[in-house]
Amino acid sequence: MFGITDLTAYVLTVLVLIALPGPNSMFCFGTALAHGFTKAKFAIMGTFLGNGTLIMASALGAGALLTRYPFLFGAIKMVGAAYLTYLGGRLLLNMTKLGKADKPSPTKQVAMTPTGTKSMTQSSTLFKKALLIALLNPKGLVFFPAVMIQFVATDTANPMMSLLVLRLIFQSCSLMFLLILTKCSGLIGQKLGQFAWLNQVGQTGAGLIFLGFAVKLAMA
């Protein structure tokens, strides 16, 4: 079908790979814990667009370009590692500030930000962060064609159609997994939100995980 050699094996491979913890899935998971499922949907959108962009770029030969010029691969990898380090550091810094927020003084006038504007800004920030995390992972440019090409029949008349179907399957599986993941973690976050110390533990754990991903990406 569509020149694909073993569709079942491909779907199982994709599901296993998606289920493995990665920077984007952990960012979506952490966003749902901290802000709920509604906000996590913006992180999912950023991840979806980022992965889709990498898939299209790999189809246009960007993966081969990075393989041919290792210094480009290394440069993107270092930028990605630096960004993950920044995110991890921010989480750890925010953890130290929990419970230390200054109470507004009755003698001072407090400037209030409209709730709708603040919510839109936060949603946009989450979307951009997830998008950057996905785009700054150069492994995706090499990974997507390397895996997908193995499931395209050598005698197919239209290999580009086969790859398109494989890309759509990957994106669909990724989207469903992230929706389920963030929905469950959002419910968990509602329970954990009742305990401040658990929130601090979650912030610390997420920060350390991102720092770990940064080290792993830099040394890969």
Image (cartoon, grey):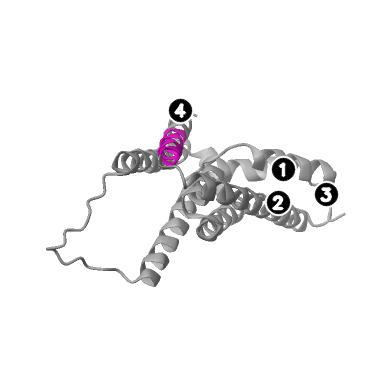
In percent of width and height, residue 51 lies at: 58, 52
Q: Earlier in the sequence, mark 2 or mark 3?
A: 3
Task: Identify the residue at image location x=53%, y=47%.
Answer: 191
Task: Report crowding for label 3: few under 14, some 14 to 19, many 20 or more residues within 10 A (C-alpha).
Answer: many
Q: Are marks 4 and 1 in contact (CB under 8 Å)?
A: no
Task: Identify the residue at image location x=58%, y=37%.
Answer: 21
Q: Are marks 1 and 2 in contact (CB under 8 Å)?
A: yes
77 above or below 184?
A: above
Q: CA distance from mark 4 to mark 2?
A: 29 Å
Q: Which mark is residue 173?
A: 2
Q: Which residues are magenta?
A: 197-209
In the picture of the structure, the residue carrying the numbered disc 4 is 219
- Kindly state the secondary structure of the residue where label 3 is placed: loop
In the picture of the structure, the residue carrying the numbered disc 1 is 15
Nearer the observer, disc 4 or disc 1? 1
- Kindly state the secondary structure of the residue where label 4 is placed: helix
Q: Main secondary structure of the magenta part?
A: helix
Q: Earlier in the sequence, mark 1 or mark 2?
A: 1
> Observer-nearest residue: 64 or 176?
176
In the picture of the structure, the residue carrying the numbered disc 3 is 4
